[in-house]
Amino acid sequence: MYLPWLATASAALSFSVHALYPLNELAKTPQMGWNNWNSFGCDVDEELLISATEKIIQYGLRDAGYQYIVLDDCWSNGRSSNGTLQANTTRFPSGMAEVADRIHNEGFKFGMYSSAGTYTCARYAGSLNYEHQDAQTFAGWGVDYLKYDNCYNEGQSGNPLITYDRYKKMSDALNSTGRQILYSMCNWGEDYPWKWAQTVANSWRMSGDIYDSFNRPDARCPCTGNEEYNCALPGFHCSAMNILNKVSHYIDKGVPHAWNDLDALEVGNGGMTDDEYKTHFTMWAAVKSALLMGNDMGRLSARDLSILNNPAIIALNQDPRGTSAVRVWRYDVDDVDRYGQGEIQMWSGQLSGGDYFVALLNAGNSSREMNAMADDIFYDDGEEGTSEESTMEWTIHDLWANRMPEDVAQALIDGNSTQASSLNVTSYYFNATETSYEDGLASNNTLLLGQPVGTLSAKVMITAEVPRHGIMAYRLRLAGWGLRKRDEL
Ligand SMILES: *[C@@H]1O[C@H](CO)[C@@H](O)[C@H](O)[C@H]1NC(C)=O
Ligand SMILES: *[C@@H]1O[C@H](CO)[C@@H](O)[C@H](O)[C@H]1NC(C)=O
Ligand SMILES: *[C@@H]1O[C@H](CO)[C@@H](O)[C@H](O)[C@H]1NC(C)=O
Ligand SMILES: *[C@@H]1O[C@H](CO)[C@@H](O)[C@H](O)[C@H]1NC(C)=O
Ligand SMILES: *[C@@H]1O[C@H](CO)[C@@H](O)[C@H](O)[C@H]1NC(C)=O
Ligand SMILES: *[C@@H]1O[C@H](CO)[C@@H](O)[C@H](O)[C@H]1NC(C)=O
Ligand SMILES: *[C@@H]1O[C@H](CO)[C@@H](O)[C@H](O)[C@H]1NC(C)=O
Ligand SMILES: *[C@@H]1O[C@H](CO)[C@@H](O)[C@H](O)[C@H]1NC(C)=O
């Protein structure tokens, strides 16, 4: 069978592809929200969810687009005598339907968790063979999102069709409830979900679990991302660079309504430097990963808030064109860190309105000058410098230059509205509840475009000093047509 989305990531095809399989109308752009697992694990209860929603609103993050509040594992108390899943009433005394109502009343959508196995990963009742009953229960509670894990799957994995069948059962069960429920598969990239899950799910995890490290290798995440496309042991403790390198080989498999999920963000959890978190966040956004914050909102620093709320970066993720950035090159470098890791990368990609994204990523151990050549940036439009784009003039916008200042972010965290308004807080954040990213981009909202810092004219290159484990990220906008035409060069 010919599958056009496997052939190319080009825009023309992504429109016809879109028409082939709208599983549902959800996740036209990657889903955004918060998931408790990375910072709280099993330590969940209804107060945690409600207090997180209040802070997410106060910090302006709900209106930046983080819509889904996703409760992970450990909410359950098993099945009642008639087989219905029931919540732990000590942790959720109000009951799940009431929790969902409160979350909805705050302007969010509510996500829940189960596993396509006999048990969940924390050994609560799983949904394998209970798909229809559990989907009805979730719909009855007012659930809008299901993260569906892969633990205790009774050996029903190891080839794509077995895994497909197991995950499709829940997909069909959710559909038959009649409720719009975003379906987030979490089978850790086993059996190549990026090859088949577009017709079944709105997103699929493509690796073992992330941990709060930029690039430290860990024996429990044995696949490196260089060769192992089908990782026999996805594991956990996968670093941000490990996951990014894995997805680099199949970023084009994410399309509107069906996305690669690089796992929830670690920004705010304390294990990376500011530059490392900027790199992590920028690349998750640029490759169109689901963007689920994974931090404790009660301990968010001003610096970390000003990463999570950067509208110019979120606009990459929510770009209506829905095309991932592509890794154009990657080299090992000699200045390795204490884990023996050192590499540099250049990424580029097309955005809506004819704009381009360019990133210079320095995962070497010291600051360095890096270059992005026009011929490389526009390689997909014409190999070896034959593209018309590489002869045009472009304005270069720095996507981190307008980062919210620390005192403004601190005023938001402190909840001091007097101070926040005297610091003009609203001039730093984009309100996606009011204006969609699509409309904001179409009207050239400067918060979304970044700060103009120069021009790229015919055949030249972008040169930047990139800090250790850091990134420089740009949006290119057409400034003029062929100042020097190709045939005049
Ligand atoms: C964003 O806009 C909505 C709708 O107008 C409004 O209710 C909300 O308070 C705004 N959010 C922020 C953070 O200003
Ligand atoms: C329910 O929650 C309470 C309080 O956190 C905990 O002690 C208990 O073990 C939980 N029950 C189950 C079945 O996990
Ligand atoms: C099953 O039992 C639970 C709790 O005991 C009850 O709330 C629910 O309505 C029952 N469901 C059905 C389908 O009978
Ligand atoms: C169920 O699937 C059909 C087509 O496969 C789709 O048109 C419909 O919107 C889906 N319904 C829900 C609730 O997801
Ligand atoms: C890597 O850089 C860090 C921070 O500058 C430095 O402390 C460390 O010694 C460097 N490691 C190696 C192996 O050079
Ligand atoms: C809020 O900020 C203002 C101006 O910076 C300051 O005067 C006031 O004391 C602060 N209020 C609180 C409750 O911290
Ligand atoms: C806030 O905005 C006003 C009007 O645009 C401007 O006059 C003032 O200098 C700004 N204040 C700060 C702290 O940026
Ligand atoms: C936005 O900017 C582009 C490129 O500069 C221009 O062609 C377009 O007309 C602008 N749109 C609006 C609504 O200003």
Image (cartoon, rainbow, N blue to C red):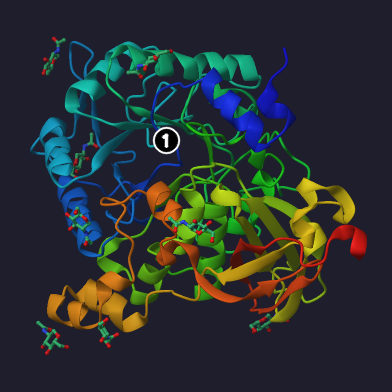
Query: Residue 169: where, in percent of width, then height?
Result: 44, 13
Query: Residue 25: where, in percent of width, then height?
Result: 39, 27
Give the residue drawn at x 26%, y 52%: 434
Closer to us: 67 or 358: 358
Closer to us: 215 or 301: 301
Write down the quadrant of residue 283 in the picture: bottom right
Q: Name the residue under label 1.
A: 27
**Quick check: 291 above or below 95?**
below
Q: Is residue 137 visible?
A: yes
Give the residue drawn at x 23%, y 44%: 108
480 relative position to 279: left or right:
right
Query: Residue 85: where, in percent of width, then height?
Result: 23, 22
Give the residue drawn at x 16%, y 45%: 46
Quadrant in which ligand 3 is drawn: top left
Give the residue drawn at x 37%, y 48%: 37
Closer to us: 451 or 329: 451
Q: Sort mark 1 into few (<14), some (14-19) or many (20+) by Cα contacts within 10 Å.
A: some
319 relative position to 70: left or right:
right
Write down the quadrant of residue 459 in the picture: bottom right
Q: What residue type is labelled 1?
A: Ala
Query: Residue 478: where, in percent of width, then height?
Result: 63, 61
Residue at the left extreme of this rendering = 94
Q: Is residue 267 visible?
A: no
**Quick check: 59 above or below 105?**
below
Closer to us: 235 or 254: 254
* Mark 1 lies within 8 Å of ligand 4 (Cβ measured): no
Write down the quadrant of residue 179 in the picture: top left
**Quick check: 430 above or below 455?**
above
**Quick check: 478 above or below 44?**
below
Quadrant of image for the N terminus: top right
